Amino acid sequence: MSNSFGQIFRISTWGESHGGGVGVVIDGCPPQIPLSEEEIQIDLDRRRPGQSEIVTPRKESDSCEILSGVFEGKTLGTPIAILVRNKDQRPSSYNEMKDKYRPSHADYTYDAKYGTRAWHGGGRASARETIGRVAAAVVAKKVLAQLYPGIEILSWVQSVKDIEAQVDGQTVTSAMIESNIVRTGDPEAVGPMTDLIKMMRSEGNSVGGVVECIVRNAPAGLGNPVFGKLEATLAQAMMSLPATKGFEIGSGFGGTQLTGAEHNDPFYMDGDTVRTTSNRSGGVQGGISNGENISFKVAFKPTATIMTEQQTVSSQKEDTELKGRGRHDPCVLPRAVPIVEAMTALTLCDHALLHAAQCGSSQAS
């Protein structure tokens, strides 16, 4: 169903933004993978609210509890259940939204589909649902590290509105990205991006932008032809995230401005390894990874909740107005960085295990 992702390494997330808690069940994880709550907590802390002055002030520790599937510090091969309890709930902030649809939110569409919705907060449409994805991705990263030592997944904020970062995907490090509250890899862009986000918050407005991701030391051979293409799965993974509006891999839409002679990635031999002199394919050709860095971008819209009056309609189908309430991110990008990394890890881990199941090898080349 729509709450699950993956075929062999399969996750199912559950919970609403202002319910008792949120979490994930992971099925298909290999046994004897070392795993602790402390390791999971590191990435949950990168995603959690209240971590800086430019994100939502909701105060949640997002402390995780492993309920099953781990014994004496290692996975059992059985389903792993991870729970994060909601602590700082304020459903009263959403009383007005019970009968009024928030513009560009999922309120109306949920009512249209189900005839009911969890109106105190975004329910399943809230970014709080992504806690389960981030927790599960810690496990996926550990599986990937055993299969492909040296594989590295990094994401950063590439742009906020029209402010572009200058980041070298070949040399940017996790330390550089995590050294600032925007999570961009360009020190010169930190100030302007931070100032813009603060200004949007002061005006009761919001702003969007682009997160870029790179996978270094990815093996060749992950992915499948036709419907199982690696870039198609990555696109599904990224477009399943709240507030996403676009995905492009490699040259993306810019590649349409080039000729074939300009766009092709010529092959050459680097010792015993097949390499390409350029990487406009973004590390994927024919739906299968070619061993070069996998690189793509994800577009995030401005946060839908803004603190100014907007025209809307009520659940009784009457024209009305609504002003945003509650605690919200003026820009989702800083907290989206670890979530993009998480969905990348989940996608690659599933493809790695699919490759092993079909091709009889634990590793692609």
Image (tube, rainbow, N blue to C red):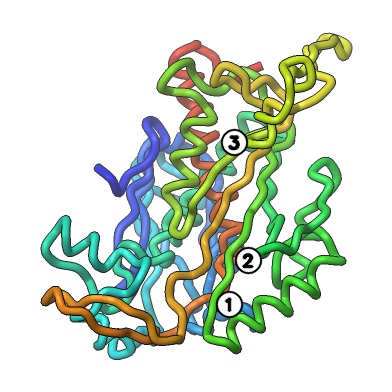
Secondary structure of the residue carrying tag 2 is helix
Read off the residue under disc 1. Answer: 55
Q: Nearer the viewer, residue 245 or 87?
A: 245
Within 10 Å of the Cα at label 3, are there few (<14), some (14-19), or many (20+) other Cα atoms? many
**Res. 343 visible in picture:** yes
Q: Amino acid at mark 2?
A: Pro
Q: Nearer the viewer, mark 3 or mark 2?
A: 2
User: What is the CA distance from the residue labelled 1 to the residue labelled 2?
Assistant: 8 Å
Circle 1/circle 2 CB separation < 8 Å = yes
Read off the residue under disc 3. Answer: 144
Q: Nearer the viewer, mark 1 or mark 3?
A: 1
Read off the residue under disc 2. Answer: 334
Q: Is residue 225 left or right of residue 322?
A: right
Q: Amino acid at mark 3?
A: Leu
Residue 81 found in image quarter = bottom left
Q: Amino acid at mark 1?
A: Val
Sooner in the amino-acid sequence: mark 3 or mark 2: 3
* 86 is higher (above) or lower (below) than 138: below
